[in-house]
Image (cartoon, rainbow, N blue to C red):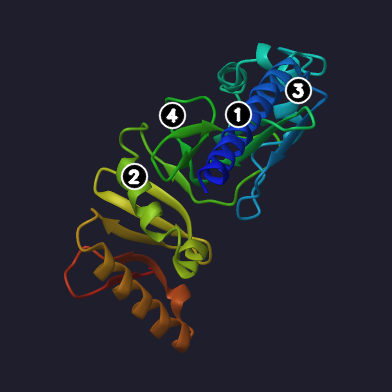
Amino acid sequence: MRTRRFLTAFFAVLLVAGCAVAVTLGIREGRAQTFTGLEVTVEPLDGMYLVEADAVRAAILRQDSIVGRRVEGLALAEVRTWLEGLSGIGHLNIYPALDGVLHVEVTQRKPIARLHTPESPVDLYVDAEGLTMPLSPFFTARVPVIHAPNAHAARHAITLVKRTADDPLWSAFIDQVLVTPLGLEIVPVVGDLRVEVGDLGRLDEKLRNLSAFYGAQLNRGDLDQYQRIQLNFKDQVVAQRRS
């Protein structure tokens, strides 16, 4: 019995030691491996393509040819720095595969608005975090345009767009948001009028009132008679007719 237990324990030790040697050899072999290719994939984002896989690949290849480079000689953190200047990149997942291919997986930042200010010579996209990014040369996102004196003044308009971005009704309704001395104004996609929102106080109530007003006027067919709708007053909508 003792002999059997001893042999069982002995072979178990040999098995563990053999696995350790195999893992060690595999690690050494992996470190000595060279890259055989570069594969870049960009995760689609609601039909938006602000990042092109070819642009990511080109940015990497400008720094290193990758193919033939030893795996242990390439710091993945360094690859990240090569891509920092590309617009629209959210998260990066970079890893070498067993076949020697360097994989770069990209997720995109999602713009919720386009920011237009006198202080900037070009428009910028704004994401849900309020961070700006340059427009893409590859794709134009269909998002509301915010007109504001400067980026700081646009923060309430960004909040308004963020609150309504996931609602199919309001995301289809809002074409532009204007930042004025009296607060926020909405320019609808359809109709030649302005909707005065004012500040963000009671925003849910204001949107409910606006929805009810629009529904009633559309049923009557006389929405075109109005040039301005005010939501600043509690529990009511004040509509100004065209002169």
Where is residue 27 drawn, in percent x and y? Answer: 66, 23
Mark nearest the camera among 1 and 3 is: 1
The residue under label 2 is 179
Residue at 39% from the left image edge and 41% from the top image edge = 129
Taking the image as drawn, is residue 239 in sight? yes
* Residue 49 coordinates in the image, percent (x, y): 67, 44
Residue 141 percent coordinates (x, y) = 60, 47
Residue 213: horizontal and vertical position, in percent?
Answer: 35, 78
Q: What amino acid type is highlighted by mark number 3?
A: Ala
Q: Nearer the viewer, residue 38 or 212?
A: 38
**Which mark is first along the chain, 3 or 1?**
1
Residue drawn at the location 39% of the way across and 53% of the way down: 162
Q: Name which residue lies at 31% across and 74% down.
A: 208
As drawn, the residue found furthest toward the left would be: 234
Task: State if disc 4 and disc 1 touch (CB < 8 Å).
Answer: no
Cα gap from disc 3 to disc 4, whole angstroms? 33 Å
Look at label 2 and name its amino acid. Answer: Val
Q: Front-most of 101 and 18?
A: 18
Marks 3, 2: nearer the viewer: 3
